Image (cartoon, grey):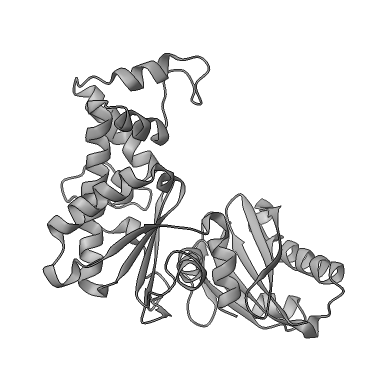
C-alpha cells in the first residue's frame, strides 16, 4: 500500500495525517510543538511520529510517497523557511533537512495557510473551483490563494498574507508585524474585541457585553469578553456588538475586493475560529465586498471552510 503524509506545524501543536494514494485519510494525530532550544527538536519529533505510524501499519519507507509539510512562515519554492518566529527558527532548507532525516523520503514544504487553501480547494468547500482564496480568521488573519488550480506563493513565499494588507492609513497603533493599519488589526478575533472596546470607551453602551463581563461563570476573566461574545451580542440585537461586526465586515470587504481585483476568484472560503459565527459573518462580508469590488470581479461565492483543523494535513498530502 502506498501512503502519503500531511503535516501541519503550529505554534502549539503539530497535526499529522497519513493518507492513501487517493488522499483518503487513514489516521491522524497531534503532538506538542517543542519550542525549546529554538525549536531544534521539532523535525526530529515529526520524524519519530511518522516512523511510529508506519510501523503501526507495518509499512516501510519505500511505501511512503512523500511528506507535505506546512509551516507558519514564508517558504521559498526550494523549501527554505524564511524565519519562523512562532517556532524559534531562522532560515534553513526544511525540505532537504527533513528528507534526509526520513532517509530521503520526498518532502514538499509550503506556508501553512497556502497548504490549508489547497486542502479546501481539493477536498473541502472549494471543490470544483479552480480559483479559490482562503482567509483564516482567528487570533490573527491568514490567507492562501489558488489560481487556475495552482498555489500562488510569491518570490519569497509570502503571497497570500492577507492579514497584513494595509486598510487604514490613519491608524496610530502598530500591528504585530510592526506596520500600522493592517487588516489583522480590525478583522481578527483580537481586532473585533479591540473595536468593541473602543466603542465602549467612546461612551456607547452594550448591555450584552456588560452582562458577560459581570458574570463570574463566563468563559472570560472578570471584566473581559471574547470575539464570540461580540458575535453573540450582535445576533441578540445588541447595537454596539452589531457595529463592531459591521466594522469587521467593512474592512474584510475592502481587503477582499482588492484581492479579487488581482486574482478574480470564483470562490472565497472563510475559515479559522471566527468563522464559527456562520451566516452572520458571511452576510456582512458579502455586503461590503459587493460595495467595493470591481463589477466584473463581484461574482464570487462566499463559503465557510469545511475541513476545519484538518485542512492543512489534507493540503499537505495533496501536494505530495
Q: Quadrant of residue 160?
A: bottom left
Split into 4 quadrants, where in the image is the N terminus?
A: bottom right
Split into 4 quadrants, where in the image is the C terminus?
A: bottom right
| Residue pictured at 18% horizontal, 52% vertical | 288
Q: Position of residue 149 (x, y in %)?
A: 41, 80
Q: Nearer the viewer, residue 245 or 42?
A: 245
| Residue pictured at 35% horizontal, 35% vertical | 231
Q: Position of residue 105 (x, y in %)?
A: 72, 82
Vertical order, 202 against 103 (above or below): above
Q: Position of residue 183 (x, y in %)?
A: 29, 52
Q: Nearer the viewer, residue 277 or 73?
A: 277
Would residue 239 appear left or right of 210 to someone viewing this image?
Answer: left
Q: Is residue 120 visible?
A: yes
Q: Quadrant of residue 114?
A: bottom left
Q: Is residue 167 visible?
A: no
Q: Position of residue 70 (x, y in %)?
A: 56, 67
| Residue pictured at 37% horizontal, 31% vertical | 232
Would residue 206 appear left or right of 19 to someone viewing this image?
Answer: left
Would residue 188 appear left or right of 99 to someone viewing this image?
Answer: left
Q: Nearer the viewer, residue 160 or 82?
A: 160
Amino acid at each position: 500500500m502506498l501512503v502519503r503524509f500531511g503535516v501541519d506545524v503550529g505554534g502549539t501543536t503539530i497535526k499529522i495525517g497519513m493518507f492513501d494514494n487517493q488522499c483518503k485519510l487513514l489516521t491522524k494525530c497531534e503532538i506538542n510543538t517543542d519550542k525549546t532550544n529554538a525549536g531544534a527538536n521539532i523535525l526530529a519529533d515529526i520524524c519519530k511520529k511518522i516512523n511510529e505510524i508506519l510501523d503501526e501499519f507495518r509499512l516501510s519507507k519505500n511505501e511512503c510517497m512523500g511528506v507535505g509539510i506546512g509551516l507558519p512562515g514564508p517558504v521559498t519554492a526550494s523549501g527554505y523557511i524564511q524565519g519562523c518566529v512562532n517556532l524559534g527558527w531562522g532560515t534553513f532548507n526544511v525540505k532537504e533537512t527533513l528528507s534526509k532525516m526520513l532517509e530521503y523520503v520526498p518532502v514538499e514544504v509550503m506556508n501553512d495557510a497556502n497548504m490549508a487553501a489547497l486542502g479546501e480547494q481539493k477536498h473541502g468547500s472549494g471543490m470544483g473551483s479552480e480559483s479559490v482564496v482562503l482567509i483564516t480568521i482567528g487570533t490573527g488573519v491568514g490567507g492562501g490563494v489558488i489560481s487556475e488550480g495552482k498555489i500562488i506563493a510569491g518570490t519569497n513565499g509570502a503571497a497570500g498574507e492577507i492579514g497584513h494588507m494595509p486598510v487604514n492609513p490613519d491608524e496610530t497603533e502598530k500591528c504585530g508585524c510592526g506596520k500600522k493599519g493592517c487588516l489583522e488589526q480590525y478583522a481578527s478575533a483580537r481586532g473585533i474585541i479591540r473595536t468593541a472596546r473602543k466603542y465602549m470607551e467612546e461612551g456607547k453602551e452594550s448591555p450584552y457585553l456588560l452582562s458577560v463581563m459581570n458574570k463570574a461563570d463566563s468563559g472570560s476573566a472578570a471584566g473581559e469578553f471574547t470575539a464570540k461574545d461580540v458575535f453573540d451580542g450582535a445576533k441578540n440585537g445588541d447595537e454596539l456588538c452589531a457595529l463592531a461586526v459591521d466594522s469587521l465586515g467593512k474592512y474584510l470587504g475592502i481587503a477582499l475586493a482588492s484581492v479579487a481585483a488581482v486574482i478574480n476568484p470564483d470562490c472565497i472560503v472563510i475559515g479559522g475560529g471566527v468563522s464559527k459565527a456562520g451566516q452572520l459573518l458571511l452576510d456582512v462580508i458579502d455586503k461590503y465586498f459587493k460595495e467595493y469590488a470591481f463589477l466584473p470581479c463581484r461574482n464570487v461565492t462566499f463559503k465557510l471552510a469545511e475541513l476545519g483543523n484538518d485542512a492543512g494535513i489534507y493540503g499537505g498530502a495533496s501536494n505530495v
